[in-house]
Amino acid sequence: MSSWIAEPAAKPLRGELRVPSDKSISHRAVLLAGLAQGSSVIEQPLLGEDVLHSIAAIEALGAQTSRQGARLEITGCRQPLSPAAPIYCGNAGTLIRLLAGLICGRGIDCVLTGDASLSRRPMGRIAEPLNKMGAEIATTAAGTPPITVKAVKGLASIEYKMPVASAQVKSAVLLAGLVAEDGATVIEPAPCRDHTERMLPAFGAQVTRNGQVVHVQNCPALQPVQMSIPADPSSAAFFVAAASMVKGSDLLLREVGINPTRTGALELLRRMGADIEIVNQQKIGEEPVADIRVRAEPLRGIEIGAAEVPAAIDELPVLLAAAATASGTTIVSGAAELRAKESDRIAAMAALLANLGIACQEKPDGIVVEGGQPTGGEVDSQGDHRIAMAGATLALCCDREVRISDCANVATSFPGFDQHAAAAGWKIHPSGPTPTS
Ligand code: S3P
């Protein structure tokens, strides 16, 4: 099990860097190209473990892939084949849910499995709408993986009002809608990331949006694409928060996705007092992209409510690390979805903050954090990549080093996190086993 020692900042964080590419967009590009009728080229996909599982998944369905440096070529399988063995989705909720939607009406039998964390996560939320469309999807009695998909060819249309604001559920239904005669309609309770809707037209599928109602038309045969993937705003968020927190810092983050469904954390940090400048705006495909310049400023506590959660859902752990160093109290509510992530992120962050000497109170749907001076000590990442990186971020402002356990899963979303950190003057190194007495 790999552990880290993250050191308090000895000096301001400075420099320029490009964090790895967007995980959500990479999964979608790989899965859709995997079914397309011809060869697609994806430039700069994230090659973290989660997306490597997506690449292996489409290969298991009959696609061919080859990689040259940052260029991934995928020859789609047109018609997927029932794989001989279960498809292992690792830690990746996006992969298991989107893949289930994509294949459940394409006439193949398939079992989708995952690691210990994924095997605890709720899949009833996709099985329910997909089965309403005529798919035959089963989960365990607890509604968790493995997911068993039985061969069904073609699906019925649906108009689905999502009970939770989940881009993975929305995407699963839209991808299933590609093989439904009249497509599929999803009504979101609040805007959540829209990469699927933005990307589908490049593959030949028509998508329309009217407020929070999204419709995809029937389009079983997908065209190949050429596309490039921007840097991941969720990975950049660790550096945005870190540079805001460490006095004297000045960091430039290059080519970061600034899709408005993903920039909630930037808005929240600004409300906390952060100095964040968006420069060099451009578009990569349908995705808006920019460089982000961050200079340290004293932060203050804020209230974060349900309406602000979906656009900052993956950044809330690091926002709580920032809140721990802010003046005053930060109150997060309406964020119960955090309990259904790679770990229960409310409980994991409450334990992390308490271990580092920060007063906080866990609530069923959020947390209250009293800003202060974190001490340092030991934290358990619970095998969750974003908890590990949030711990390393808070370490920058601690009195002494922080030892973080179980960090291997950082490679699922942010391979080379420690090297990127080092380039900005932030010291994180592997630790030996904890001594036993
Ligand atoms: C994702 C959607 C979000 C997010 C996850 C990636 C996606 O999950 O937390 O990291 O790529 O669609 P939910 O759909 O469960 O909110």
Image: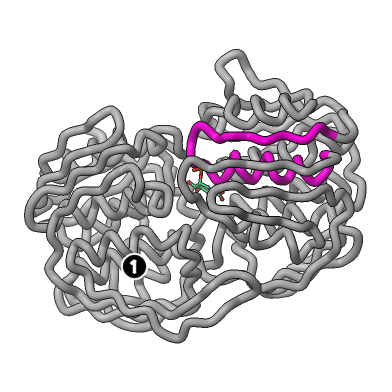
Q: Is residue 40 above or below residue 406?
A: below
Q: Quadrant of residue 284?
A: bottom right
* Residue 169 lies in the magenta-colored region: yes
At 72% from the left edge and 34% from the top edge, which residue is drawn?
A: 158
Q: Is residue 181 visible?
A: yes
**Residue corresponding to mark 1:** 239
Q: Quadrant of the N terminus?
A: top left
At 83% from the left edge and 35% from the top edge, which residue is drawn?
A: 105
- 92 horizontally vs 192: left or right: right
Q: Residue furthest bottom?
A: 280
Mark 1 neighbour density, 10 Å: few (under 14) some (14–19) many (20 or more)? many
User: In the depicted view, which residue is nearer to us: 147 or 375?
Assistant: 147
Q: Position of residue 138 (x, y in %)?
A: 70, 21
Q: Position of residue 356 (x, y in %)?
A: 16, 45
Q: Is residue 378 above or below residue 339?
A: below
Which secondary structure lies at badge 1?
helix
At 26% from the left edge and 71% from the top edge, which residue is drawn?
A: 243
Q: Quadrant of residue 280?
A: bottom left
Q: Is residue 3 visible?
A: no
Q: Position of residue 169 (x, y in %)?
A: 59, 39
- 81 horizontally vs 333: left or right: right
Q: Quadrant of the C terminus?
A: top left
User: In the depicted view, which residue is nearer to us: 155 or 19?
Assistant: 155
Q: Is residue 48 above or below residue 249?
A: above
What segment is highlighted magenta in the picture?
155-180
Q: Is residue 1 above or below residue 59?
A: above
* Residue 136 lies in the magenta-colored region: no
At 28% from the left edge and 51% from the top edge, which residue is drawn?
A: 391
Kind of residue indicated by mark 1? Phe
Q: Residue furthest front?
A: 210
